[in-house]
Image (cartoon, rainbow, N blue to C red):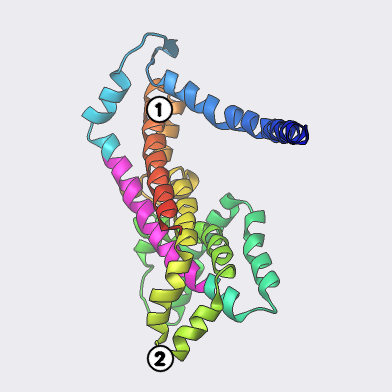
Amino acid sequence: MTAGRADIGVHAREQTSLWGLFPMVVVQLALFVVPIAIMFVYSFWTTQNYQVIREWTLANYLVFFESWTYPSVLFRTLWMSAVITIATLCFAYPFAYWIARYTQRWQKILLGAVVLSFWTSGLLRAYAWMALLGHGGIINKGLMQIGVIDEPLTFLLYNPFPVILVMTYFSLPFAAITIFASLEKMDWALVDAAADLGANPVRTFWFVTLPQTIPGVISAAILTFVPLMGMFFVPLLVGNPSSAMIAPLIANLMQAFQLGLGAAMSFIVAVVVMIIIVVAWRYIRLERP
């Protein structure tokens, strides 16, 4: 009799927990599943004279793969996102390590300063970088006044370099906070033990610190890479045609009412991103003990 009541209680708790997941399921369906499904359907339709022709066809995908322009922009977006992700991790890891290891008293203030950057409009921050990097900007004027250069440096703006620089700046807070969360959970006694056993700082980091924080590094890489694939305004403001990325191209297609082609390209990008996330998540699961 007691066992039966216990089973009923467990079943009731399971039903309660399932109902607790209902709001999350609704949000996931409304914000992610339904939009992707609509985009997938539109990718098989075409438009003509600003009218959607609801006839199923693979024409949009054929246009994408038969053209050299669209795949090349996608490949450029992938490698630029990869380069920016690597650069972001190279800056974010030492910064997060320094906060977690050496600033116990000021951790909250420093983390608050990192989070504070989220409160400012990204567009305003991009324009601020343009004021710094422009031909008549602070950097060029300062270098010319002290005699380092005779004319403005052209590579500082409207080139791939400022795109990588500004997007790295935008991605740094996400990566730093994620890596810090991983470092905060690390057993620092192992680092001290490695030093006591004669390991130099490089070996200690490579064999003790990094393996314990690999899940955090991979999570930071995902949180950096995925938004970069959809970054819109930074390439338009500080880049040039040679640094064009896929998101502005899709936006231009949508504005030209090429809904089917834009949806097909969006779905291809979504598939690529989901594959990367699945591979990274599988690696994290394999790394866990």
Residue 71: where, in percent of width, then height? 27, 37
Q: Is residue 280 visible?
A: yes
Q: Residues within 10 Å of mark 2 (few under 14, many from 20)?
A: few
Q: Is residue 187 above or below residue 54?
A: below
In the visual, does 32 lie left or right of 23? left
- Magenta span covers which residues? 72-95
Residue 213: where, in percent of width, then height? 48, 66
Q: Nearer the viewer, residue 13 or 243?
A: 13
Q: Is residue 73 magenta?
A: yes
- Residue plotted at (49% across, 67% down): 92
The N terminus sits in image quarter: top right
In the visual, does 260 lie left or right of 98? left
Res 180 quadrant in image: bottom right
- Report which residue position mark 2 lands on: 198
Residue 17: where, in percent of width, then height? 70, 36
Looking at the rendered structure, the kind of residue marked 1 is Gly
Label whose residue precedes the other's in the sequence (1 or 2): 2
Looking at the rendered structure, the kind of residue marked 2 is Gly
Q: Is residue 252 above or below residue 166?
A: above
- Report which residue position mark 1 lands on: 262
In the visual, does 211 lie left or right of 11? left
- Residue plotted at (41% across, 32% down): 266
- Residue plotted at (26% across, 36% down): 69
Res 88 quadrant in image: bottom left
Q: What separation in Å lies between label 1 and label 2 (alpha carbons)?
A: 58 Å
In the visual, does 145 lie left or right of 243? right
Q: Residues within 10 Å of mark 1 (few under 14, many from 20)?
A: many
